[in-house]
Amino acid sequence: MNVRLLLVDDHPILLRGLREALAQQPNFTVVGQAPTAALALKLAQELTPDLVVMDIHLPDMNGLEATRQIRQALPSIKIVIFSGDAARPLVDEALQAGACAYLTKSTDLGELTHAIDMVMEGRLYLSPEVSAGILEDYRKSLVENPEPSKPLLSEREKQLLRLIAEGRRNKEMAENLAVTINSVETYRSRLMKKLGCASTAELVRYAIRDGLLPV
């Protein structure tokens, strides 16, 4: 498959080098280049490339806004962000704007061509520097805001909770569990304390949330 590319960057030397490098790839054809967002939008409409390699910091408009406008007007065009700035807010905004990949300008040609191939296959791609930052942010969020662990229930406790949620009487629960009614009361009290529930209604809600009882 021949991929038709539009290159957008306001640095003439980088733009020329990028064009020459990509033009040497057998499956790529560079159909246009633009140093500004305005020209990029114009060429995207006229040339309808398969993919745009887009810088972020352009002289007339943020490349992310240009990405958003291109995707709105021509949703079939795929966008690869190619920027020297890997700040997490920019990465998030790029993905929200419809970009399919985010690479830093420290990326070599092999990785860029690989990212283009993946995007054309319908997949997303983040360069290692970008994905490492996202993973580190995620790790920090787990450490700083850990989700409370749910109490581990025994099979008998799950069975009791299910029976309570089904509205069974103590006598029915005692027969089902093969225990005395007094034991049912004791187990219920322990279960409420373990789950932090103050009423039968809270036990029912817990059972529904935990999938022990269909809604």
Image (cartoon, rainbow, N blue to C red):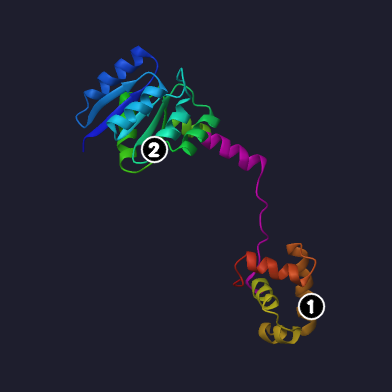
The structure residue drawn at horizontal position 36% and vertical position 38%, both measured from the top left corner, is 74
Q: Residue 200's image quarter?
A: bottom right
The structure residue drawn at horizontal position 62% and vertical position 40%, both measured from the top left corner, is 141
Residue 214 sits above or below residue 50 on the image: below
> On the image, numbered disc 2 is attached to which residue?
73
> On the image, numbered disc 1 is attached to which residue?
185
Q: Which residues are magenta?
A: 134-156
Magenta stretch contains residue 147: yes
Q: What is the x, y in percent for residue 45?
A: 33, 32
The disc placed on residue 38 is: none
Q: Quadrant of the C terminus?
A: bottom right
Left or right, residue 199 beside residue 81: right
Q: Residue 214's image quarter?
A: bottom right
Badge 1: how crowded within 10 Å, few (<14), some, or many (20+)? some
Q: What is the x, y in percent for residue 42?
A: 35, 27
Q: Which numbered disc, 2 or 1, marks the residue that appears first in the sequence?
A: 2
Amino acid marked by disc 2: Ala
Q: Is residue 191 visible?
A: no
